[in-house]
């Protein structure tokens, strides 16, 4: 992966709908060359897909929370299909520390959140943090300039 690939990744992370022509102009390449690079990055699994960022709040889900859950290893085979089937779960990660799962959820009300936590407690102990604000939202890893910053 070279500097141009990194530049393309940055542009796509900023706006995945950026037209190939615009990416090509900024990267000083032809549109077919940019398309070939993007396809190569997709085949390599570096670009895993494209999605739209939405406002959960504007869709009627103003309660955003992070739930820590302590799941025993023997329960994971039962827990994973359960958590995958929950539409209010935005993300679930297996983590280190006191709890084994970190779950990001969005709900219409604290009552719905409370009911969901009750269901989770069938799998283990929980600890919940409700989000007041998000000063830095979801974003990708900045690729260009990162080498100079000593990050990559």
Image: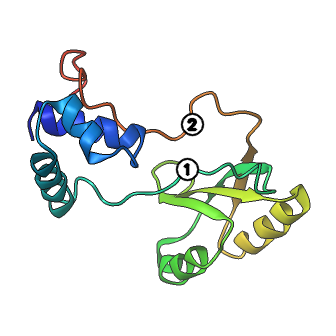
Front residue of 51 and 145: 51
Q: Quadrant of residue 68?
A: bottom right
Tally of marks: 2
Percent across and percent down for residue 117 are 77, 65
Front residue of 75 and 18: 18
Q: Quadrant for the C terminus, please.
A: top left
Which residue in the structure is indicated by mark 1? 53
Q: Nearer the viewer, mark 1 or mark 2?
A: 1
Q: Quadrant of residue 102?
A: bottom right
Q: Considering the numbered disc 2 on the image, is that residue within a helix, a strand or a loop?
A: loop
Residue drawn at the location 8% of the way across and 35% of the way down: 2
For residue 15, above or below residue 35: above
Front residue of 32 and 119: 32
Task: Mark 2: give few (<14), some (14-19) or many (20+) Cα within 10 Å.
Answer: few
Residue drawn at the location 22% of the way across and 53% of the way down: 46
Residue drawn at the location 9% of the way across and 47% of the way down: 33
Q: Quadrant for the N terminus, please.
A: top left
Q: Considering the numbered disc 1 on the image, is that residue within a helix, a strand or a loop?
A: loop
**In screen coordinates, is 19 left or right of 116?**
left
Percent across and percent down for residue 71 are 57, 68
Residue drawn at the location 71% of the way across and 76% of the way down: 122
Percent across and percent down for residue 72 are 53, 70
Tell me whether the residue at label 1 lies in contact with that at label 2, contact meaning CB atoms closer than 8 angstroms: yes
Q: Earlier in the sequence, mark 1 or mark 2?
A: 1
Which residue in the structure is indicated by mark 2? 137
Percent across and percent down for residue 11 are 32, 37
- Which residue appears farthest toward the top when viewing the image? 149
For residue 150, above or below residue 69: above
**In screen coordinates, is 73 left or right of 38?**
right
């Amino acid at each position: 992966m070279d500097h141009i690939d990194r530049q393309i990744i940055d542009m796509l992370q900023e706006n995945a709908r950026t037209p190939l022509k615009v990416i090509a102009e900024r990267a000083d390449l032809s549109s077919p060359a940019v398309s070939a690079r993007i396809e190569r990055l997709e085949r390599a699994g570096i670009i895993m897909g494209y999605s739209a960022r939405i406002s959960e709040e504007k869709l009627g889900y103003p309660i955003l929370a992070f739930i820590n859950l302590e799941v025993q290893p023997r329960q994971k085979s039962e827990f994973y299909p359960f958590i995958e089937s929950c539409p209010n779960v935005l993300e679930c990660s297996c983590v280190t520390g006191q709890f084994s799962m970190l779950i990001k959820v969005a709900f219409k009300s604290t009552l719905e959140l409370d009911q969901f936590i009750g269901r989770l407690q069938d799998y283990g102990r929980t600890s919940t943090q409700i989000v007041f604000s998000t000063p830095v939202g979801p974003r990708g890893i900045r690729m260009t300039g990162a080498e100079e910053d000593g990050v990559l």
